[in-house]
């Protein structure tokens, strides 16, 4: 097929009729007459398509709908739905396909091992990740839907283009959906700035945002008011903007903020009790009164399970390789540590807390100890701590569950200050130098960073104390503090190994001087 092949007019007409009358599954209609960008995307005749937009813009839905139409319109067609990682595809795009797009009565079979769905008209749809290269490398398909294309490299895209060679369909097409990213990203350059490709009719781009989707629930739209500044521009307005100067530019709310009912990462799926029983739980605290006091509850899987159900092997995961999920948070100003301690104990209830990593103030730590909240001093080194945190986030090992905030602080929200940790990421910036450029060697500006400090405390304290060593390590609260103290005294020499002894969980403190 020559690039730029045009759909037959009969197909465009039939497609228009289909997409404007389809009810969809679970009561969620697919009506492109309400969203002009979706209609144009569905009817486009271009070889390469991009549908970009903000949260709730209907990106994954429209990609799945187009693939479903091409598979039902042309019996014997073969399509591929792909993301960079198969687990992301399984937990997101595949759910959209099953729940809202493909009626079960149209499915002849589904091969779970090969992730191959066969429709009753003989068309096949494959679901793969590029972390399964042998699954994708030799395919011949008629259409490809690439979800979250910003996760892919341009080489990945060109490889996928080469798979569009299924012989029994009259045309081929690759279409992608994505949240916006940095304007220097190859996707933006290819679809927005490559005038040669546009002139030849090879690429077309369609954009939408949250506010343009009439099917988005009002409660969801209202929840997006929490995004401020650059995050609002990118993830609500759908703009391609730079995050230059942002310390954790690897933080992506679309990946790192999870719904409370998710089963991703092995979470339970119960929004009221999302943490599995065999996960370890932690707290991280940054003190404040005029500035907000922050207490974060974190959970981390202690074991990795392999093998078939009923005969699984269990391996302990080193701290520096673990995933960390924040499932609860106090972020509030104007209250004493003693007042906060009562709430912490009430919320923690019967949860077994492995360690509470804490800011250094001696009096405040003593107040927590008197309230039966034992703490250890956090490793507060800024630059190494940021490096540890950045590594965890960029490797997709840090997540926040939606609605983790216990109580909104009106004193913060009414003055447009961050009122939760997740709202600090966009404002946690490096300072600008004399020439007006951000200096990556300088520590971040010390403003609105209380959640960032608590985040750094928990991640860096455990990494500094226990790894990376290449070995499984076991530790309790006192082990962490002892090891962190040893490292401080030795200027953080590399750690080769540290294995827990049998000491008690809570260190004994008798006076404020013990906390200094």
Image (cartoon, rainbow, N blue to C red):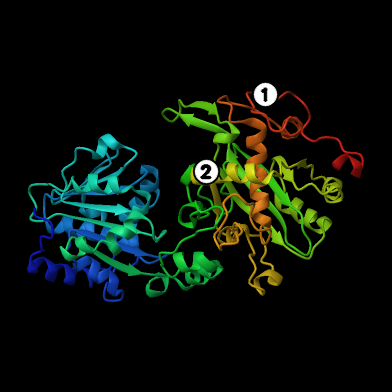
Residue 57 pos. (x, y %): 37, 67
Q: Is residue 40 above or below residue 497?
A: below
Q: Is residue 507 above or below residue 144?
A: above
Q: Nearer the viewer, residue 456 or 132?
A: 456
Q: Which residue is mark 1?
A: 499
Please state the total of marks drawn on the protein image: 2
Q: Which residue is mark 2?
A: 397
Q: Quadrant of residue 447?
A: bottom right
> Residue placed farthest to the front in the image?
435
Q: Nearer the viewer, residue 3 or 357?
A: 3
Residue 467 pos. (x, y %): 61, 31
Q: Is residue 238 above or below residue 309?
A: below
Residue 31 in sight from this viewpoint: no
Q: Quadrant of residue 185?
A: bottom left
Q: Quadrant of residue 33?
A: bottom left
Q: Secondary structure at mark 1?
A: loop
Residue sitting at x 50%, y 64%:
231
- The Cα–Cα distance between marks 1 and 2, rounded to whole angstroms, is 23 Å
Residue 172's disc is none
Residue 87 pos. (x, y %): 39, 43
Q: Which comes sooner in the sequence, label 1 or label 2?
A: 2
Q: Nearer the viewer, residue 427 or 167?
A: 427
Q: Is residue 278 left or right of residue 44?
A: right
Crowd band around label 1 with a 10 angstrom C-alpha radius: few (<14), some (14–19), many (20+) = few
Q: Is residue 214 left or right of residue 1?
A: right
Q: Is residue 88 left or right of residue 9?
A: right
């Amino acid at each position: 097929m020559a690039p730029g092949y045009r759909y037959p007019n009969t197909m465009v007409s039939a497609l228009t009729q289909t997409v404007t009358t389809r009810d969809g599954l679970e009561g969620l209609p697919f009506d492109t007459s309400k969203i002009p960008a979706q209609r144009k995307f569905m009817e486009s005749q271009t070889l390469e398509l991009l549908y970009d937009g903000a949260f709730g813009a209907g990106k994954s839905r429209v990609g799945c709908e187009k693939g479903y139409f091409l598979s039902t319109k042309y019996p014997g067609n073969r399509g591929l739905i792909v993301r960079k990682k198969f687990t992301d595809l399984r937990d997101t795009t595949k759910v959209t396909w099953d729940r809202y797009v493909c009626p079960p009565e149209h499915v002849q079979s589904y091969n779970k091992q090969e992730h191959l769905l066969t429709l009753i008209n003989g068309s096949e749809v494959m679901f793969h990740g590029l972390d399964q290269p042998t699954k994708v490398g030799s395919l011949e398909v008629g259409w490809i839907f690439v979800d979250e294309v910003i996760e892919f490299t341009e080489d990945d895209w060109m490889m996928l283009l080469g798979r569009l060679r299924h012989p029994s369909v009259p045309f081929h097409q690759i279409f992608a959906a994505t949240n916006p990213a940095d304007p220097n990203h190859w996707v933006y350059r290819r679809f927005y700035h490559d005038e040669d490709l546009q002139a030849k009719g090879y690429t077309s781009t369609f954009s939408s945002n949250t506010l343009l989707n009439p099917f988005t629930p009002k409660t969801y739209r209202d929840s997006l008011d929490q995004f401020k500044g650059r995050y609002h521009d990118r993830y609500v307005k759908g703009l391609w903007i730079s995050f230059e100067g942002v310390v954790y530019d690897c933080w992506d709310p679309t990946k790192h903020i999870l719904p409370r009912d998710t089963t991703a990462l092995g979470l339970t799926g119960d929004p009221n009790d999302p943490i599995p029983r065999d996960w370890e739980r932690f707290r991280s605290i940054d003190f404040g009164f005029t500035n907000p006091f922050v207490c974060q509850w974190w959970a981390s899987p202690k074991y990795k399970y392999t093998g078939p159900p009923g005969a699984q092997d269990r391996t302990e995961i080193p701290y520096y390789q673990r995933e960390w999920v924040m499932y609860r948070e106090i972020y509030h100003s104007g209250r004493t540590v003693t007042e906060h301690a009562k709430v912490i104990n009430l919320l923690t209830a019967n949860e077994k807390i492995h360690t509470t990593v804490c800011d250094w103030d001696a009096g405040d730590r003593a107040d927590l100890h008197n309230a039966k909240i034992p703490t250890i001093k956090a490793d507060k080194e800024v630059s190494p701590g940021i490096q540890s945190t950045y590594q965890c986030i960029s490797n997709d090992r840090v997540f926040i569950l939606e609605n983790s905030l216990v109580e909104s602080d009106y004193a913060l929200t009414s003055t447009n200050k961050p009122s939760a940790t997740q709202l600090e990421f966009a404002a946690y910036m490096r300072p600008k130098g004399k020439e007006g450029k951000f200096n990556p060697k300088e520590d971040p500006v010390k403003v609105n960073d209380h959640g960032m400090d608590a985040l750094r405390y928990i991640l860096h304290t455990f990494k500094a104390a226990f790894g990376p060593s290449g070995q499984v390590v076991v530790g309790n609260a006192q082990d962490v503090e002892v090891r962190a103290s040893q490292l401080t005294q030795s200027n953080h020499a590399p750690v080769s190994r540290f294995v827990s002894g049998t000491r008690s969980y809570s260190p004994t403190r008798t006076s404020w001087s013990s906390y200094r």
